């Protein structure tokens, strides 16, 4: 379906043309004075210069000419603005079309394009912490938004599974359990299926090894050697590494799924390593890379740069590969296995330079066609009230698991306060509300900005919060259930049409406001997709929840005597509920039946 704003603009463009002016002046925008009108057109102001006429004269002519059928008001206002209100009856027709249209009238913008979303980015053997929250939450939402827009989307967790930490774990394990077969050079049997550690042991082994590496030179060298042997493919270490990976990934999956975050691919840095030698060779042979103080670098600076960008180092002087090398090789791997049209990386914005280097080097070295879009979606930090990165009360790094548990507990208290509910049910509901609180708080901020973690505010049932959105949805659900009960319809599905016979009925201001908000759905999604901005969807559902609550307080839906009107209202709020459900699904959370 065309967006409402396009339909209105079309009418105004027609009127401008009919009056002999360029149609471009007919573009309409959402009013910045909603107290006066819903939409406005400022084209007469601009046209005045070209046609050397007073803007108000042009505005008057256009208003005279415009097809009034769509509008309840089109007025020229000095010095030359055109104020517009849409006829409520027309709105009902538009909403009726939405109700029956695929995706409620949103036309897929990106059909057939394939996209890889690289998000999550956890490092194996390390528990997820608050620093992993945003990539997971924003990435999941971006993935769903792309999917809704018609993309074929692949979400890849891109594990950090190949670095020095592996050697540190191996050597620390040797110190703890020297008799394991993996450390017996003469061992020739099969390696056990069972890992020699649990996840909680692993989470202890890793920091112990990493700590020793910092203070103990001998241990550090051992860890480096073990890493090198692993990377050369030494079988016992590969076997150990697989254990580390399996134990860790099982735990990561559990934690991500508690956040309603799911990946299509569980690949990692290790999967790209096979491509490195040939990639480096080609960079050297084709002259893309040059030696610089023993290292191999690719120059990526461009003339138009406003600040100097350092070259991308692809091999250190000791021959080792770096983070950049792996990301470049991962592009080769993805090109070969998936051939996407677009790459979206959802990573901390402090890594921006890294991605500029990688993107430029990748194109320069011909790892992928230049027209392919490499997009860095950098996000800001979650801070504490002191404005510094959020910490636990003891000053440590906050584990994601504990963060989620804390939010759920806070919500649970609110759910239980002043009401009867079985504890079991309240726990389940609190989990849904907790995820919504956390994700909404994160997503409602523009991704690139930092924000302050404020559990009281995030879990409040009032204000611009996830729980408020869910509360509104639950309220709609309960009205629909009541209506279904009294009118005798099953499971709250109401197919009552909008519009219909009563073209001239009165519409209240709150009702019009709600209709207008609902009608913006396709426009909002289109912009959110274009700008990869889930916060636009948050803004929209907050606006919708407010509009619904205004409507709810202005009208007694259940005791309305005019049954036709009541039916229209039910149809309207059913649509509103469906739109909200669609939006929160894109954001990555869901609503309970009651709360
Ligand atoms: N594991 C990395 C880190 O902890 C994040 C990975 C982001 N994705 C990427 N393709 N580099 O910083």
Image (tube, rainbow, N blue to C red):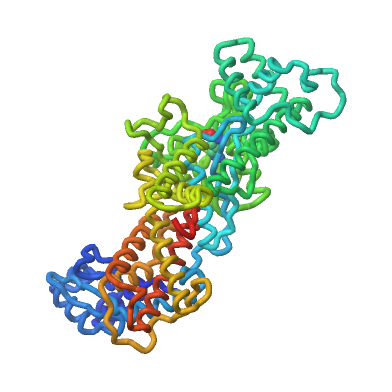
Q: Residue at x 30, y 75 (%)?
A: 23
Residue 5, given in percent of the width and then of the height, sits at 34, 71
Q: Residue at x 52, y 42 (%)?
A: 359
Is residue 126 in view from this perspective?
Answer: yes
Q: Residue at x 52, y 56 (%)?
A: 144
In this rendering, the answer to whether 108 lies above or below 278 is below
Q: Is residue 57 left or right of residue 480?
A: left
Q: Is residue 336 left or right of residue 261?
A: right
Residue 35, given in percent of the width and then of the height, sits at 20, 66
Name the one closer to the observer, 284 or 176. 176
Is residue 450 in view from this perspective?
Answer: no
Name the one closer to the observer, 508 or 71. 508
- Residue farthest front in this picture: 420
Task: For ligand 1, give the image quadrant.
Answer: top right
Name the one closer to the observer, 476 or 438. 476
Residue 545, given in percent of the width and then of the height, sits at 35, 61
Q: Is residue 32 left or right of residue 125?
A: left
Q: Quadrant of the C terminus?
A: bottom left
Q: How many marks?
A: 0
Residue 111, given in percent of the width and then of the height, sits at 55, 64
Q: Quarter of the image holding residue 215?
A: top right
Q: Quadrant of the N terminus?
A: bottom left
Q: Residue at x 47, y 54 (%)?
A: 587
Q: Quarter of the image holding residue 39?
A: bottom left
- Residue farthest right in this picture: 189
């Amino acid at each position: 379906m065309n967006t409402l704003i396009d339909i209105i603009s079309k009418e105004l463009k027609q009127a401008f043309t009919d009056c002999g002016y360029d149609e471009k002046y007919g573009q309409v925008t959402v009013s910045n004075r909603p107290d006066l009108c819903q939409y406005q057109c400022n084209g007469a102001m601009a046209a005045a210069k070209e046609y050397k006429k007073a803007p108000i004269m042009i505005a008057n002519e256009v208003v005279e000419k415009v097809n009034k059928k769509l509008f309840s008001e089109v007025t020229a206002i000095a010095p030359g603005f055109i104020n517009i209100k849409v006829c409520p009856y027309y709105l009902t027709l538009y909403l009726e079309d939405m109700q029956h249209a695929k995706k409620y009238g949103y036309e897929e913008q990106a059909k057939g394009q394939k996209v890889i979303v690289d998000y999550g980015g956890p490092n194996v053997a390390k528990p997820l912490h608050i620093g992993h929250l945003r990539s997971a939450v924003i990435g999941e939402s971006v993935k769903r938004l792309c999917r809704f827009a018609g993309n074929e989307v692949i979400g890849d967790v891109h594990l950090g599974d190949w670095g020095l930490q592996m050697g540190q774990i191996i050597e620390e394990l040797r110190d703890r359990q020297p008799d394991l077969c993996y450390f017996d050079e003469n061992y020739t049997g099969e390696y056990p299926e069972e890992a020699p550690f649990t996840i909680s042991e692993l989470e202890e082994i890793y920091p112990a090894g990493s700590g020793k590496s910092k203070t103990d030179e001998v241990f550090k060298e051992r860890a480096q050697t073990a890493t090198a042997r692993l990377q050369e493919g030494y079988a016992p270490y590969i076997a150990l590494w697989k254990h580390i990976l399996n134990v860790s990934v099982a735990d990561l999956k559990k934690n991500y799924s508690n956040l309603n975050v799911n990946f299509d691919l569980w690949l990692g840095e290790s999967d790209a390593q096979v491509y490195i030698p040939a990639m480096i060779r080609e960079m050297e042979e084709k002259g893309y890379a040059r030696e610089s103080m023993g290292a191999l670098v690719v120059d990526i600076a461009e003339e138009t740069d406003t600040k100097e960008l350092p070259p991308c180092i692809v091999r250190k002087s000791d021959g080792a590969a770096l983070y950049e090398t792996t990301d470049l090789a991962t592009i080769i791997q993805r090109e070969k296995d998936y051939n996407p049209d677009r790459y979206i990386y959802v990573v901390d914005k402090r890594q921006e330079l890294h991605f500029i280097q990688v993107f430029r080097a990748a194109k320069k070295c011909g790892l992928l066609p230049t027209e392919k879009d490499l997009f860095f979606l950098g996000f800001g930090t979650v801070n504490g009230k002191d404005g510094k990165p959020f910490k636990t009360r003891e000053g440590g790094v906050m584990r994601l698991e504990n963060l989620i548990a804390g939010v759920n507990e806070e919500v649970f208290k609110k759910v239980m306060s002043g009401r009867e509910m079985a504890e079991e049910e309240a726990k389940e509901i609190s989990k849904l509300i907790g995820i919504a609180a956390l994700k909404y708080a994160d997503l409602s901020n523009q991704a690139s900005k930092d924000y302050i973690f404020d559990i009281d505010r995030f879990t409040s049932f009032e204000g611009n919060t996830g729980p408020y959105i869910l509360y509104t949805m639950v309220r709609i659900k309960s009205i629909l259930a009541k209506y279904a009960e009294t009118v005798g319809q099953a499971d709250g599905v109401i197919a009552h049409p909008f519009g219909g016979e009563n073209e001239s009925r009165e519409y209240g201001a709150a009702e019009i406001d709600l209709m207008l908000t609902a009608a913006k759905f396709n426009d909002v999604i289109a912009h959110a997709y274009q700008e990869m901005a889930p916060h636009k969807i948050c803004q929209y559902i907050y606006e919708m929840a407010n509009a619904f609550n205004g409507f709810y307080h202005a009208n007694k839906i259940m005791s309305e005597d005019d049954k036709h009107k009541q039916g229209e209202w039910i149809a309207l709020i059913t649509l509103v509920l469906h739109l909200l459900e669609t939006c929160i699904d894109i954001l990555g959370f869901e609503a309970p039946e009651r709360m």
